Amino acid sequence: MVLEKAIDAINEDDIKNLKTENVSEIKTLEYKRDLPTNSYDSKKEFLADASSFANAGGGHLIFGIEEENGLPKNIIGFENIDPDAEILRLENLIRDNIEPRIQGVSMRAIALSTKNTIILIRIPQSWTQPHVVNYQKHWRFYTRNSAGKYPLDLFETRGAFALSNSLPEKAKDFRNSRIGKLIEKESPVPLGKNALIVLQIIPFGSFNPSTTFNLNSIENITLRLNPIYGGSIDQRYNYDGLIIMGNTADDLSRSYIQIFRNGIIETVNTNMLRSYQKEAPTIPSGLLEQNILSNLSSFLAIQKQLGISPPFFTMLSLIGVKGFTMAVKHGLDTFKQNQFPIDRDVLLFQENIIEDYETDLSRIMKPNFDAIWNATGWPRSMNYDELGNWGKGPNSHK
């Protein structure tokens, strides 16, 4: 379909092609002649449309096209409107009256040669469904089929809740499976024998069996990606998708990045957590946290390029860390009462949720970083100040 491109790239020609090619309204596409007014019924109708797309497979609402029997009849657009103000109004309607919030909604004003404007709304399939319209006294779940939107019945509502509630377990199952393979030395590339850092970022939508992305579109970008605490030397396709290999020593990789076809990204490092100068093994806390935050930011950029909509799970794991203590800044190391070796080999930290691409990653990851410090006897990550600002704590190099 002509709309299967980045929303910012859709132009008047694409809109005209909908009419030229007689693209009919379907489950994922609906034409609207008029924008919603400020009346109760009009707003309720718009909210029902928006929530129905999120609760089904996602899709597009196009305002400014007159349809007849589901086919685009006239591309009219709107005269003398303020596109930015109109988009803000629609965004606020969705944000304030649909629960939980639909992540990843995008809108675009498309100028026509007639000087009129089309408003295009892209609503992704949501993995935090079901979403309910909660507008004044109207409280209802909606979904869609080929005939348009309709209210969810009790059975369908229960099914939608069950799907949403199963996602954390599916993410944990994926993590556990990958950790098991790494412990059994079944990694996609041969790794060194040191302790492992494993970081995964998992789109909610990755567990849909039909979810797959064309990784060819990101080849040039991934060449610039670096695994945790290391550079990349090569990339190639493998059974799971695309793998980026890190630097090697004695024919063993120090790190890698695995990009799965369903949008999951995993990076593993086996070079940072080790003994330095024959001393007891330590965790370089500032370096570890900085690299994790940097990698997450890079991975989100790749997933955005692939067109993946939030939210995401992040999962952090440390393998082979029994006996490690925390390496801290000079001055903090006088507090020896806080230094206790980690008492287990594998640490699987709680999953975190990234709700949108503008999320403050340092705040999202703070519970995991605190837990690493807790495992070595400290009350919290000393790279944060008392207000939760990363890079401003007593262990930070300011």
Image (cartoon, rainbow, N blue to C red):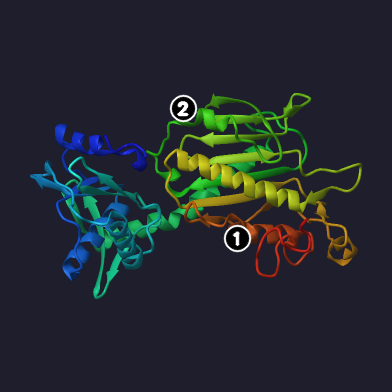
x%, y% of residue 319?
71, 46
Residue in front for this viewpoint, 385 or 29: 385
Viewport quadrant of the N terminus: top left
Q: CA distance from mark 1 to mark 2?
A: 33 Å
Mark 2 lies on a secondary structure that is helix
* Residue 264 can be seen, yes or no: no
**Above or below for 349 versus 222:** below
Residue kind at label 2, given as amino acid type: Asn
Instruction: Judge left or right: residue 390 versus residue 206.
Output: right
Q: How many marks?
A: 2
Amino acid bearing label 1: Arg
Left or right of 272? Residue 73 is left
Rendered residue at 37%/60% (across/down): 161
Write the residue at 30% across / 64% down: 93
Residue sitting at x 70%, y 70%: 386
Q: In the image shown, does 95 or 267 lie closer to the viewer?
A: 95
Q: Mark 1 near mark 2, Cβ–Cβ under 8 Å? A: no
Quarter of the view holding residue 253: top right
Q: Is residue 126 in view from this perspective? A: yes
Specify the quadrant of the image occupied by residue 134. bottom left
Residue 213's place in the image compared with 358, above or below, is above
**Tag 1 secondary structure:** helix
Q: Write down the residue under mark 2.
A: 216
Q: Position of residue 92 (x, y in %)?
A: 33, 64
